[in-house]
Amino acid sequence: MAAPRDPNKLDRLVAEARRAAEIRDKGDREQALKLFAHICARCGSEFAGANLRMLTVHHKDGNHDNNPADGSNWELLCLYCHDAEHSRYLDATGRDGASFDAQPATHKPFADLRARLKRIG
């Protein structure tokens, strides 16, 4: 007889992975804040005091496990620029993360507009 399945196993694994990512990200951020000026690398906004929480660490190569001690894979981005950076990536690769070759549209919705207007009027 097989052992009963634990229905909460997946929830625990996801929660554990999220906690580990949060701990890792906090460490990366703290190191980056020590290494770099508190300025967004994209828009140039400066951050201090309570606004410092708006600066995030962006991994240039997208690999969150690539964390050289010199910070060469990091840049500080404000929340808005960080979101824009990831949106740009999603737009380039497709929302599901798979790359695609965008083909130009071939449909011409107004191709026979003149003829249709003549029929109406």
Image (cartoon, helix red, strand yellow):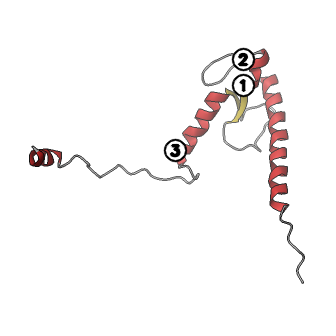
Q: CA distance from mark 3 to mark 2?
A: 30 Å
Q: Nearer the viewer, residue 8 or 18?
A: 8
Q: Amino acid at mark 2?
A: Phe
- Label drawn at residue 114: none
**Residue neighbourhood size for the residue with mark 2, other residues' Cα within 10 Å, grouped as few (<14), some (14–19), many (≥20):** some
- In the image, is 32 to the left or to the right of 89? right
**Residue neighbourhood size for the residue with mark 1, other residues' Cα within 10 Å, grouped as few (<14), some (14–19), many (≥20):** some
Task: Please tell me which of labels 1 and 3 falls first in the chain.
Answer: 1
Query: Mark 1 = which residue?
Result: 54
Task: Please tell me which of labels 2 and 1 falls first in the chain.
Answer: 2
Q: Is residue 80 above or below residue 60?
A: above
Q: Nearer the viewer, residue 55 or 110?
A: 110
Query: Mark 2 = which residue?
Result: 47
Determine the secondary structure under disc 3: helix
Q: Tell me what residue is drawn at x 80 percent, y 47 percent.
A: 18
Query: Mark 3 = which residue?
Result: 92
Determine the secondary structure under disc 2: loop
Q: Amino acid at mark 3?
A: Ala
